[in-house]
Every structure is written in C-alpha cells, then in structure tokens.
Image (spheres, rainbow, N blue to C red):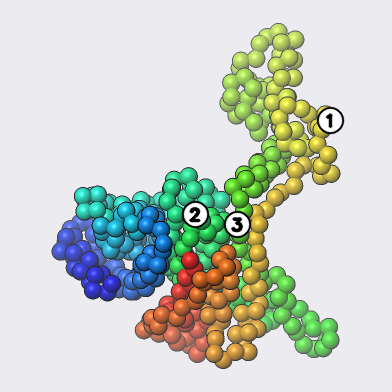
Amino acid sequence: MIQEVIQILTLWGVTWAGQDGFAHLLDKTTLYHEVEESIIALHFLVEWLQQRNEQTAITLVDACCGKGILSMLATYLFRDKTETQISNIIMLDKQEDINWNHIKAANEHAKEERRPTITSWGGCNLHEIDTIVDKLETDTTEPLAIIGIHLCKQLSPACVGVVNALGKKKCPYVCLAPCCLPRMVRNLSKAPNSGMIPNRGRSNQMKKDTSSFTIPVRVYESLEERQARKEANKRREMAKKRTFRDVPCYLCSEMHSIHKCNLLPANENERLDIFQKAQLQMPCWKCGEIGHMKKDCPSTQSSSKPGLILPPTIELDIASIIDEGEASESKGPFEKYSQLLATSIQRSENIKVVDVGLVNSSAQHNNRANGHNWNKDRKSLFIVAS
C-alpha cells in the first residue's frame, strides 16, 4: 500500500503542482503525517474487506475529515473496486468553509476512472448524534465503514456513539484513532484544584471525588425507540409553548399573536369564535398534544409537562485511567483510555487496540518541560472493531 500511495502522491503532484487552489493540499505542513496515519487506517480497512464473506460494496465515512486526505487516498486506492469494496465515500466535518477544491477535482473523472465518488458534508457536528445517524440512514443504502483519525477530546466517544446508534448491521466496521485525553482526565489528576474532597477517615488528607468523572457514550436503540423518544421530547417542547406568540397564527400562519392579526373580522362574535378555535390549536400545557386545553387533559402523568427522555448511554469511568495508570508502569493513561473506549463499542468480539509503532518526532509529542506527556502514545494507537 505504501508503494501505491507513493504513486498516488506523485500523480497529484504531476496533475496539480503550480495550479491555483491546490497549494493548500500539496504544501500542507502536516501532509506527511496525515498520509502516514491514513495508510494505517486504510490497511486495516482493506484487511477487513478481504475477510468479508459479502461481495457487496460499502460506503466509507471519513469522520471529522478536515482536508479529506484519507478520502482522497481512498478514492484512488479503490479504483475498479466500486462494486465489490468501496462504492462511495462520505466526508463529514463540522466546518463548512474548508477549501475542498481538490475533492471537486478528484470527482471530475471519478466515474470514468471507476473510482468512488467523494461527497462532502460540511456543517455536521459529530456531537449531534441523532442528526448524523438520521442523515446516514436516510442518504445511504449500503453498510458503512467509519474511520475517524485524531478525533479530539469528546469527539472520540461521540464517534463511538454514532457507530453504536447505527447498529452493527448498518455499520459493521469502525477504525478510530483518538487524538487526546478528555480534559476531565487532566482535571482529575490535579490536586487540590479539582476533583478533590476531604477524606473523612484522615482529617488532614484529601481524596479524589471520582463520582462525576464519567463520560456517557450512546448505545443502540431501535428506529422505533428513537422515533418514540423524539416524539416524546417534541411534545415536551410543545407543552412549554405558553403563548400565542410561540405558535403560528391560526389565520395567516405568521409568527404573531392571533389577537394582533390583520385578518381578524370586525364582528365580535366571529372574533371570539376564531379565538376559541385558535386556542384548540395550541399545544396542551400538560401533555403537549393539540386539540384540548390543560383543564381537559386526559393524560395521567404526574408532572406538569412531559418529562425529558434521554437517549440510552453507558458511562465510562474515567477515574480508573488515573488510578490504574498511576499504579501501572507498563501502560500509560492514553493507552488505558483507548482500551476503555474500545469496551464501549457494541461488538461481542473482534475489537482490538493496536499499537502500530508510529512515532511523531516532534518534542511537543514526546517530551514536555515537566518530563511527562499524557498523550505521547496518541499517534500509534488505533482502535479497530468489526
């Protein structure tokens, strides 16, 4: 694969060097490192594709893609394999103003060269899991393989949440390279600034309060369960609408009070009749349904409005990273974190944390002024689940 990538990079240079709009790709300061990491992720993907029994193609999702180096390499690596391996590539990123001229250029001849087409989804926040899952389920028909390289802080648990929420049938493969430890891990390690409470047994000592140092990770719920949760929360929001200003006008559908609508008739009786009909279009202040008022509400709920239903999650105990990391000389906090995160992926088997041996030579990654780098292993650890 390294030799194939060298040929691809040479092709990019021959095709685009010196052209306006491509310096942001070819002169990218981190291009070498991103290509290096992409080769590892694509190696694991090819390995899995070769072991699959199915002959149908899948869609590759490049999560938090940035410039899309992984996607660019993939579209050339999977030439002539759109029917059996990768049919399409989706890049998603929170930013919408990324220069993706090179993606457009790669797509120009993708079909005639029998390469996967790359679709760019800007404005996709990975933390908005329901939105991402709905879009992936709606806009794709093939199974998904999700790859996320260097997902910072809480983005790695969010990516696992997307994978879990999609389910292993829709998303049978994920490769994830976390970027750094969540901030709460660093906070937990500091004393006495945060995470500390008095130790009642020893009045002059402190102990770490680990009860709040957990990270929720979304788990699978069926489409019916997800829709029921959304509908319930929608009713809750409707129940919180207390005035005519919060709903469209009964007469003209504009956002203003029915009492101020220019279409109101002059006749007083007709106006009162319209006000009563408009009132029935208001959501009930107790249950959120339309068609009755709170005093006539048939709901048996004890609360004044529908309760908020949260999606199902599991909690990752981040405190164990520090406790075990401090006690173990063989595994540092970042490796412990990667292994803990791997346990939250909903697969019964075929989950591994692989140390691929990549090293970043910069002093920022390997040595700090205080002699300790919490994230020193981040370039070498990949989580692979299938």
Within 10 angstroms of label 1, few (less than 14), some, or many (20 or more) residues? few
Q: Are marks 2 and 1 in contact (CB under 8 Å)?
A: no
Residue 24 visible in the displayed image = no
At a point 83% along the width and 29% down the height, the residue shown is 296
Circle 1 SS class: helix
Circle 3 SS class: loop
CA–CA distance in space, label 1 to label 3: 38 Å
Relative image position of residue 258 (x, y in whole percent): 67, 23
Task: Give the labeled residue for mark 1.
Answer: 295
> How many numbered marks appear?
3
Task: Give the labeled residue for mark 3.
Answer: 220
Of the two numbered discs 2 and 3 on the same chain, state the one appearing first in sequence: 2
Front of the two marks 2 and 1: 2
Task: Give the labeled residue for mark 2.
Answer: 170
Relative image position of residue 244 (x, y in whole percent): 69, 29
Identify the amino acid type marked 1. Answer: Lys
Quadrant of the rendered image containing residue 76: bottom left
CA–CA distance in space, label 2 to label 1: 45 Å
Tell me: 38 left or right of 234: left
Identify the amino acid type marked 3. Answer: Tyr
